[in-house]
Amino acid sequence: MDQTDLRILRILQEDSSLAVSDVAKKVGLSASPCWKRIKRMQNEGIIRYQISVLDAKRLGFGLTVFINIKTGEHSTSWLKEFSATVTAMPEVMELHRIAGDVDYMLKVIVPDMAAFDAFYKGLIGTAALTEVSSYFTMETIKETTALPI
């Protein structure tokens, strides 16, 4: 990966809907070599998806919650089942296994407190959880999908 690849990636992180010819102009290439670089990075898994980022609040999802989970169970089979169950929940935007005082952290987006309560009841019914702590976002100051490349 060279500096041109990185410039292409920076541009695509900002607007993946740009035509290849527009990306090529911005990096000083013709369309064909630029397209080949993009295809290579897709094939190598560097570019995983090209998606639209939606505005959660404008779509009625007004509540973002970070949930810390402690569990007494740490077997591979438990993790596999827990992960499959939680990742199937559409409200879960992120699931992380973490080091520290808690075992897992979730980022959940729901319309309101009633929806969160329903989600929470479903979550605690999925597995043996020792402790569940929820933190409600009052304001999102920065949110990005762009990597610092």
Image (tube, rainbow, N blue to C red):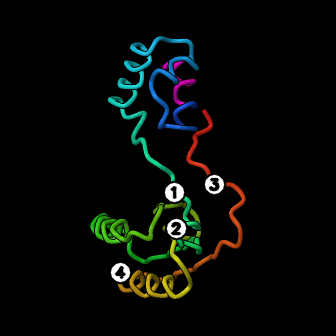
The answer to which of marks 2 and 3 sits earlier in the sequence is: 2
In the image, residue 18 above or below residue 79: above
Is the C-beta separation of discs 2 and 1 under 8 Å? yes
Q: Residue at position x 55%, y 64% from top? A: 56
| Between 18 and 84, the one nearer to me in the picture | 18
Q: How far, Cα to Cα, is label 3 from label 4?
A: 30 Å
The answer to which of marks 4 and 2 sits earlier in the sequence is: 2
* Mark 3 residue type: Glu
* Mark 4 residue type: Ala
**Magenta part of the protein: which range?**
1-9
Is the C-beta separation of discs 4 and 2 under 8 Å? no
Percent from the top left, x then y, of residue 52?
47, 49
Label 1, secondary structure: give it. Answer: loop
Residue position for label 4? 127
Residue position for label 3? 143
* Mark 2 residue type: Leu
Is the C-beta separation of discs 4 and 1 under 8 Å? no
* Mark 1 residue type: Leu
Q: Is residue 54 left or right of residue 73?
A: right
Q: Is residue 16 magenta?
A: no
The answer to which of marks 3 and 4 sits earlier in the sequence is: 4
Crowdedness near tag 2: few (<14), some (14–19) or many (≥20) residues, C-alpha within 10 Å: few
Q: How far, Cα to Cα, is label 2 from label 1?
A: 8 Å
State which mark lies toward you, 4 or 2.
2
